[in-house]
Amino acid sequence: MSDLYGTSYFQSVRDAYQPYGNVYALGTFLNTNPRAMEADEFQLVPTKSTVTMFDLLRQKIGAPTFEDEFQTNSAKYRSRNKWIKAYLENQFHKNMAIGAEGTEFLDGIGNQAVEHTLRLVKVVDQEYNVSYFLLTGLAVLESTVDELINAKKMAQTDDPFIMQDNKLALNGQGIVAFIRALAADYFADHIQDDELQQLYQYQNVGGNFMTQGMIKEAPDAKETGRIGYLLTTTHQWQA
């Protein structure tokens, strides 16, 4: 019997994207170059462990290597985040800069299925305080939480998914713990308790991955919406 931690609230959503059998082929892609963030569009690059995992899965079904996939379809693994900068500058009335982005993409799907993407964007204000903007689908959020818990990078008790009045809900403290764990994993940013400030929530975020702006879907929209969070901190930017 497996000792791995895992929940299955959104398993049926993940089942739609499992070409390798019972595997949700999710991998980490990063760009930590602040200058790249100034471009209208930039490339996200898979981590070594992501390439290794994708290649092993592809080998089982006789598919070409992920290196071939990435070279041929690199546009699937690109991003835009200038609109996040503009949105937050408008909300907080201060100058912002984007320092880095980390994203979870599915092998072969990338930015083409927005509900199966998770992105954490590192934002720096004019006082050099760092904030973290999380935008994610629920199924990929659940999967990434499970991975961090199994990797001992996050406590099981910090799982943000909770049952409340017989309904599934997201716990704010769990989201804060998740963002801190992901910031450490992606950017080696270790946010201390006394550096935490405020958590802002954005619900029913529609649009596609490359959309320029925050499009809010109606709560009863048929399209699978995303949720967003901004965690502000006093953690200082270090170039």
Image (cartoon, rainbow, N blue to C red):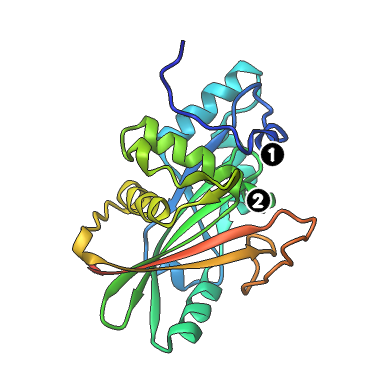
Of residues 43 and 199, the one nearer the viewer is 199
Q: Is residue 108 above or below residue 220?
A: above
Q: Residue at x 48, y 41 (%)?
A: 144
Q: CA distance from mark 2 to mark 1?
A: 9 Å
Q: Is residue 237 above or below residue 147?
A: below
How packed mark 1 is, by other alpha carbons closer than 10 Å (few <14, some 14-19, many 20 or more), is some
**Amino acid type, mark 1:** Val
Task: Left or right? Give the position of 128 relative to 39.
Answer: left
- Residue on which the image places disc 1: 13
Residue 105 in percent (x, y) is at 56, 45
How packed mark 2 is, by other alpha carbons closer than 10 Å (few <14, some 14-19, many 20 or more), is many
Residue at the front extreme, as displayed: 165
Which numbered disc flags the more N-terminal residue, 2 or 1?
1
Q: Which labelled disc corresponds to residue 115?
A: 2
Callout 2–callout 1 Cβ contact below 8 Å: yes
Q: Is residue 5 above or below residue 123?
A: above
Residue 216 in percent (x, y) is at 67, 70
Instruction: Indicate the secondary structure of the residue bearing disc 2.
Output: helix
Task: Left or right? Give the position of 149 relative to 62.
Answer: left
| Location of the C terminus (image quadrant) | bottom left
Q: Residue at x 65, y 50 (%)?
A: 115
Of residues 191 and 18, the one nearer the viewer is 191
Q: Residue at x 67, y 71 (%)?
A: 215
Residue at the right extreme, as displayed: 222
